[in-house]
Image (cartoon, helix red, strand yellow):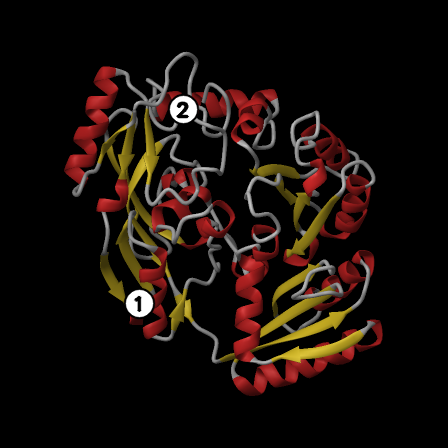
């Protein structure tokens, strides 16, 4: 049975990790637990996880200055609370963090979980990733040391930028306690131009043309057909901003893509609902009642995306959703291939990527026994793996924080 430690202050978090370090007992860093299925099942050698460090007690916004576009909050603060606070001031989290709870079950997610996983949604093509919006961070390392990095302005880093290092480390280096991020003004309006019925290769051409135009596209995605919500494939591009600007750019995009297929437009409300669905990968989340259908997240060269999906599909039946103009592929194995013999098709998928210019393949969802036996994250070249091991030793020499969450032995 796992014993849960739930600090309510930074000092209590430090005490908990100091105790775990002294006892050399590994702990799972957890908030609301909505991303427990993201990554390898934890464990390091013969040591089992007997304790969880629950950071959901570290909650609340500690600083919000809308005029300065800066917000600080405890790591356990629900994302919904933060998004509601900034929306009330006409602002937003520009990197559009996805709510992966819909993939794994549960409700909501926390600021710390989003930063620990470096999550970003469709607007990444314009606004960047989560780590690009971090101003400062406070965390407790596996040594039991309280570290702080950055501050409340953008140009505040001298020496090592620990905020960027800890973002995307999945709790393997330190337990995040407080985070400062920049927010941006929300768009006055938005429109989404839809092109229905085109194949994947044509969709990539449409998205590339839109993103390379002067129309400042903030989202470009292609959804497969065959579902009740979208029986035909649909390609979508989004523009945001002031009303006259959006109207002009939307007209320009309709003229640009109009010859490719049947064109329609989503107004602001419908556009927001559409991109929330893309952001949260809802079509994949709802594709199986069990929630165990293997789902891959592939980061690739955009103009090779359609070729990559075609090559994978020739070996492994599945469904693909393209985001980031083709730079991000969500590939879900068909239900009748979910238990394929090489563990969710990881060898075939990585072989295809290697033959098409490279890329990164992450197994976002799969049964625990599969995630325990295959590389969930892209295998690292030997020099990079050695560097990762040295970084882990520096931050967590006893290997007590989320051991094995990303790579075995790290």
Identify which residue, 165 or 269, lies in the foreground. Answer: 269
**Image position of 123 with respect to 32: above or below:** below
- Determine the residue located farthest toward the top in the rendered image: 46
Q: Tell me if mark 2 has few (under 14), some (14-19) or many (20+) residues whose alpha carbon lies within 10 angstroms of its own.
A: many
Q: Helix or strand or loop: what does disc 2 sit on?
A: loop
- Determine the residue located farthest toward the front in the rendered image: 289
Q: Image quarter for residue 221?
A: bottom right
Q: Tell me if mark 1 has few (under 14), some (14-19) or many (20+) residues whose alpha carbon lies within 10 angstroms of its own.
A: some
| Quadrant location, the N terminus | top left
Across and down, in percent, residue 10 comes to: 18, 40
Q: Earlier in the sequence, mark 1 or mark 2?
A: 1
Across and down, in percent, residue 54 comes to: 27, 38
Residue occupied by mark 2: 403
Q: Would residue 39 be seen by someone viewing this image from the given angle? A: yes
Q: Image quarter for residue 22?
A: top left
Across and down, in percent, residue 310 comes to: 81, 45
Residue 235: numbered disc: none
Residue occupied by mark 1: 85
| Quadrant location, the C terminus | top left
Q: Helix or strand or loop: what does disc 1 sit on?
A: helix
């Amino acid at each position: 049975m796992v014993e849960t430690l739930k600090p309510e202050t930074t000092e209590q978090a430090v005490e908990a990790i100091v105790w775990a370090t002294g006892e050399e007992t590994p702990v799972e860093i957890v908030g609301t637990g909505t991303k427990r299925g993201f990554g390898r099942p934890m464990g390091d050698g013969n040591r089992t996880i007997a304790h969880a460090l629950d950071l959901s007690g570290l909650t609340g916004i500690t600083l919000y200055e809308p005029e300065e576009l800066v917000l600080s909050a405890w790591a356990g603060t629900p994302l919904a609370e933060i998004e509601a606070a900034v929306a009330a001031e006409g602002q937003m989290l520009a990197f559009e963090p996805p709510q992966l709870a819909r993939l794994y079950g549960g409700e909501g997610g926390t600021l710390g979980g989003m930063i620990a996983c470096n999550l970003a949604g469709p607007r990444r093509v314009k606004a960047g990733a989560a780590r690009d919006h971090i101003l400062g961070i406070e965390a407790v390392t596996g040594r039991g040391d309280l570290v702080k990095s950055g501050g409340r302005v953008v140009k505040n880093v001298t020496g090592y930028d620990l905020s960027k290092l800890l973002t995307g480390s999945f709790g393997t280096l330190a337990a995040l306690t407080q985070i400062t991020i920049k927010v941006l003004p929300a768009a006055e309006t938005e429109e989404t131009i839809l092109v229905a019925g085109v194949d994947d290769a044509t969709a990539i051409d449409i998205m590339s043309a839109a993103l390379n135009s002067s129309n400042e596209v903030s989202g470009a995605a292609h959804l497969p057909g065959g579902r009740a919500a979208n029986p035909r494939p649909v390609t979508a591009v989004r523009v945001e901003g002031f009303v006259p600007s959006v109207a002009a750019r939307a007209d320009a995009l309709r003229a640009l893509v109009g010859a490719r297929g049947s064109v329609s437009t989503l107004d602001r409300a419908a556009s927001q609902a559409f991109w929330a669905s893309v952001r949260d990968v809802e079509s994949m989340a709802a594709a199986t009642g069990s929630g165990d259908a293997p789902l891959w997240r592939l980061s690739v060269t955009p103009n090779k995306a359609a070729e990559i999906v075609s090559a994978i599909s020739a070996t492994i039946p599945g469904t693909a959703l393209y985001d980031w103009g083709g730079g991000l592929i969500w590939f879900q194995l068909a239900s009748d291939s979910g238990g394929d013999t090489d563990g969710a098709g990881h060898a075939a998928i990585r072989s295809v990527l290697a033959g098409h210019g490279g890329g990164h393949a992450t197994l976002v969802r799969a049964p625990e026994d599969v995630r325990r036996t295959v590389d969930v994250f892209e295998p690292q070249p030997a020099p990079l793996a050695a560097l990762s091991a040295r970084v882990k030793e520096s931050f967590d020499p006893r290997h007590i924080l989320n051991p094995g969450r990303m790579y075995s032995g790290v």
